[in-house]
Image (cartoon, grey):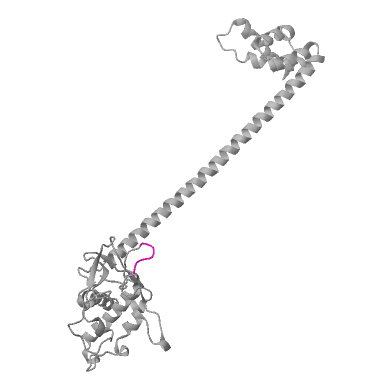
Amino acid sequence: LLTGIGETSPTEVGMVFDRNMGIPYLPASSIKGAVRYAYCVNFAKDNPDKVDGGGNLKEDDVDDGLKLLFGGTDANDASRGGFAFIDAYSETVPELKVDIMNPHHGSYYQNKTTDGPVETESPIPIKFLVVEKGLTYKFRGFFINKKAEQYKSQLVEAFHTAMTLLGLGAKTAVGYGRFNNIEDTTDLIKQKAETRKREEEQKLKKKLEQKERDRKAKEEKEAEDKKKAEAEALKKEQAAQKAAEVEALEKALENAEGIDKDILLMRKEPTEDNAIKFYDTYLQKLNTLNDKEIELALLIKEKFNSYGKKTKENKLKRKNHVNLLLKKAV
């Protein structure tokens, strides 16, 4: 395959290379030109009555598919083609080799002699790069309107003609740029595209579901953090309140006397020993209670209520007596 023979080159014969990958390729414009010409060749073959005696075919005589697929070339009625051609690349990195042209009559071809192409001229070998045969190329394109798509079968046929009969690139007359084992993978590409679309939709769905889970987890964490912060604030508030109460209790104890002092002491140190002590001191021999004694009895009751059936009899008597006193008071 020889592609881009007219490109500027430090050698005499150029080649077109992709600017990013540095490998030779078939430009979309070259493919479009070859396929367009093949379309006309096929039309002329199927419609010999449209070809004049000199083997010429007028563009206006070709069917509407020519203009719809490839666009109009008339400067006064130019139009865009309905099929977009894309540059063609080989599936693998192509191997390049050196080929040679050996023109024997250079002076004749350059009009430097009037003797004609004589055998006395010296041949001048011209070396040039070519793509080694045996590669698989991918040709891609797509329809951009429905009208052009009506001529899909003619377009595919033109592709076949261009690649097998006419050839792509340069030096096609001597067998360069010919393709075989051509396969139309349009349906396969569509299937892959649909599969890829479904996979992307699944990925997007999973991504959205994960995003929703992350959002809920974030909200739950924020709620949990808020709850912890509120609990911590309440704990600090209760601790501060308790400290204030202890401080107030300490000050009250300094000035209190008698039962008032023992009530405060029972609040500060609600132990079983204090409960028994203050019961024995204030409540043991009473049948009725005044306000101060009720206050003390309630504090003592909280400790006595923890007594079970196996508690010593004297402790149970105290418990029952306190409950009876409070019941009468109520």
Q: Nearer the viewer, residue 249 or 38?
A: 38
- 219 relative to 124 in the view: left or right: right
Q: Is residue 239 magenta-colored?
A: no
Q: Is residue 18 magenta-colored?
A: yes
State which quarter of the image contains the N terminus. Answer: bottom left
Q: Tell me which residue sits at (27%, 70%) in the image.
A: 128
Q: Nearer the viewer, residue 16 or 225?
A: 16
- 162 relative to 261 in the view: left or right: left
Q: Nearer the viewer, residue 66 or 305?
A: 66
In this orientation, does residue 2 appear?
A: yes
Q: Tell me which residue sits at (31%, 88%) in the image.
A: 59
Rendering quarter of residue 311? top right
Magenta region: which residues? 16-21
In percent of width and height, residue 207 lies at 44, 51
* Residue 191 against residue 109 in the figure, above or below: above
Q: Tell me which residue sits at (24%, 93%) in the image.
A: 52
* Residue 96 against residue 70 in the figure, above or below: above
Q: Nearer the viewer, residue 240 or 1?
A: 1
Q: Tell me which residue sits at (57%, 41%) in the image.
A: 222
Name the residue at the left extreme: 119
Name the residue at the bottom extreme: 53
In percent of width and height, residue 163 lies at 24, 74
In percent of width and height, residue 73 lies at 37, 85
In percent of width and height, residue 50 lies at 25, 91
Q: Main secondary structure of the magenta part?
A: loop
State which quarter of the image contains the C terminus. Answer: top right
- 125 relative to 79 in the view: left or right: left
Name the residue at the right extreme: 255
Rendering quarter of residue 3? bottom left
